[in-house]
Image (tube, grey):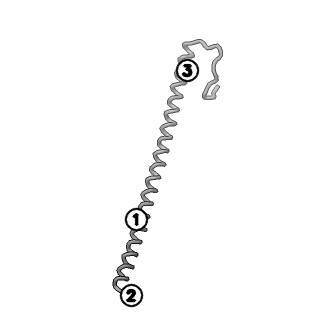
Amino acid sequence: MSRAAKFTLGVAVLGSALIIWGVHHLQIQERETMYLGVLRDEQRRRDKMKQREEDLQRSLEKREVYERVQTVSSPAPDPTGSK
């Protein structure tokens, strides 16, 4: 095998190895980035649920105040389902 052929083969093998390593490294980074997105989504969902619970509490408190102040002929069903 000539020196030029050996050099070409070596460059091709080295280039292929670097490309494979680079792609593998990018896949690892993308996987970590996607997982962080899942964590952010879970936190957003928890925040939204907490906000909805707070809104419901405020609404129930307002309803209580309004029912004390105003007369209601037929009360609406309790949204919490309790009797």
Judge by depth and name the residue closer to the eye, 12 or 69. Answer: 12
Please, what secondary structure does the residue beneath circle 3 have? helix
Residue 41 in the image, given as x and y percentages of width and height: 48, 44
Give the quarter of the figure containing the C terminus: top right
| Vertical arrangement, residue 46 with respect to residue 26, above or below | above
> Which residue does the numbered mark 1 point to in the structure image?
22
Work out how far the residue at label 3 is from the one at label 2, CA to CA, in angstroms: 91 Å
The residue carrying pointer 2 sits among few (fewer than 14), some (14 to 19) or many (20 or more) residues within 10 Å by Cα, namely few
Q: Amino acid at mark 3?
A: Arg
> Which residue does the numbered mark 2 point to in the structure image?
1
Query: In the drawing, what numbered circle is on residue 76?
Result: none
Work out how far the residue at label 1 is from the one at label 2, CA to CA, in angstroms: 30 Å
Earlier sequence position, callout 3 versus callout 2: 2
- What residue do we see at 50% from left, 41% from top? 45
In the picture provided, is 7 more to the left or to the right than 64?
Answer: left
| Vertical arrangement, residue 67 with respect to residue 5, above or below | above
Earlier sequence position, callout 1 versus callout 3: 1
Q: Amino acid at mark 1?
A: Gly
Earlier sequence position, callout 1 versus callout 2: 2
> Which residue does the numbered mark 3 point to in the structure image?
63
Select label 1 or label 2 by which is in front.
Answer: 2
- What residue do we see at 39% from left, 75% from top? 12
Work out how far the residue at label 1 is from the one at label 3, CA to CA, in angstroms: 61 Å
- What residue do we see at 53% from left, 17% from top? 65
Please, what secondary structure does the residue beneath circle 1 have? helix
| Vertical arrangement, residue 67 with respect to residue 10, above or below | above
